Amino acid sequence: MNTLIKIIISLTIAISSTSYGKLIVRHVPPDSIHDKRHTYFIDLLKIALKNTQGSNEVFSLEMSQSIMNQERAIASLQKKQFIDVLWTMTSVEREKLLLPIRIPLLKGLLGHRIFIIRKADKEKFTKIKTLKELKQLRAGQGHDWPDTKILQANGFPVTPSPSYEGLFTMLEHNRFDYFPRGVTEVWQELKEHSNKGLILDMTLMLYYPAPIYFFVNKSNKELAHQISKGLWVAIKSGEFDRIFYNHPSHISTLNSAKMENRIIFTLQNPLLPPETPIDNEVLWHKVESHPPKR
């Protein structure tokens, strides 16, 4: 085979491999078989990749088959094992370990926390009017969740658990008094645990800025750029808001949580990185309420 033919073959292979590339993105699984929260994030990830997809490119999303708590998922992504992307609440520590795509996927709603409580305690929570009164009770949270440190830094007693599913059973059995949940999470969770005598408190809400981002490995700047660019295309076209406000897991939240009628206690988030785009109003959902008593 002469030199010219070899060059032509080499160029053809190179062009084919770049023009018809396939991107495989492995993502975290849900926290349990009952956890349906992941569907929204997968929808956004698909949109972001689709918006930056070349004419001769295809992408495929694959879910890891190993159940991972947040701590393990972060460690796996650091090592480039099992997953290429995860979605989780940001913190200074997490942004040191991983590469964040600083677009709040839930428009800040994760930081609006309403309470799953025992049905027998409904009246107890209805009577609470001040932050001091609420701090007499004990919250339950995941041991590796940033929320645990945020609540503790604001003076709340917290009972941690290594098991997401275990928290519902612990609440049922009086191990703590209430389980603060993001407003987009609580409805499906109550449905999945309807046999435990748990209900939603309709009077109180905690708020702290707590954006949840997509994260990738520090070295995977190309994927980070692609996801970021695709999300911004969706934001500017209005597609992001259409997905957010019409997603099945959010419709019941925005219609039923009645956030504007609750007493809202605003907390400090000492874990919030200074790079958080707090002042970019297009990225956040705002809730107006009367100020609570102190």
Image (tube, rainbow, N blue to C red):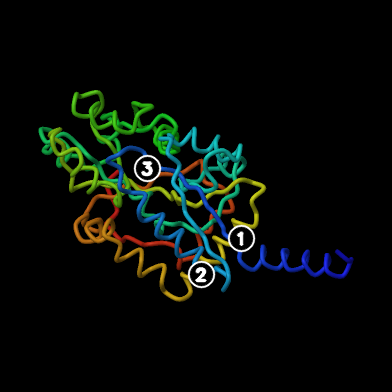
> Where, quadrant-wise, is the C terminus in this rendering?
top left
Residue under the point 73% across and 68% down? 12
Secondary structure under badge 2?
A: helix
Q: Is residue 50 above or below residue 118?
A: below
The CA span between labels 3 and 2 is: 25 Å
Q: Which mark is residue 51?
A: 2
> Where, quadrant-wise, is the N terminus in this rendering?
bottom right
Horizontal side of residue 164 vs 190, given as left or right = right
Mark closer to the chain start, 1 or 2: 2
Q: Position of residue 251 (x, y in %)?
A: 25, 61
* Residue on which disc 1 sits: 225
Secondary structure under badge 1?
A: helix
- Residue type indicated by callout 2: Asn
Mark closer to the chain start, 3 or 2: 3
Q: Position of residue 19 (x, y in %)?
A: 64, 68
The CA span between labels 1 and 3 is: 25 Å
Q: Position of residue 245 (x, y in %)?
A: 31, 65
- Residue type indicated by callout 3: Pro
Give the farthest residue toward the front: 1
Residue under the point 32% across and 47% down? 182
Give the farthest residue toward the right: 3
Residue under the point 49% across and 33% down? 72
Camera sees residue 228: yes
Horizontal side of residue 256 vs 110, given as left or right = left
- Residue type indicated by callout 1: His
Mark 1 vs mark 3: in front: 3
* Residue on which disc 3 sits: 30
Q: Residues within 10 Å of mark 1 (few under 14, many from 20)?
A: few
Secondary structure under badge 3?
A: loop
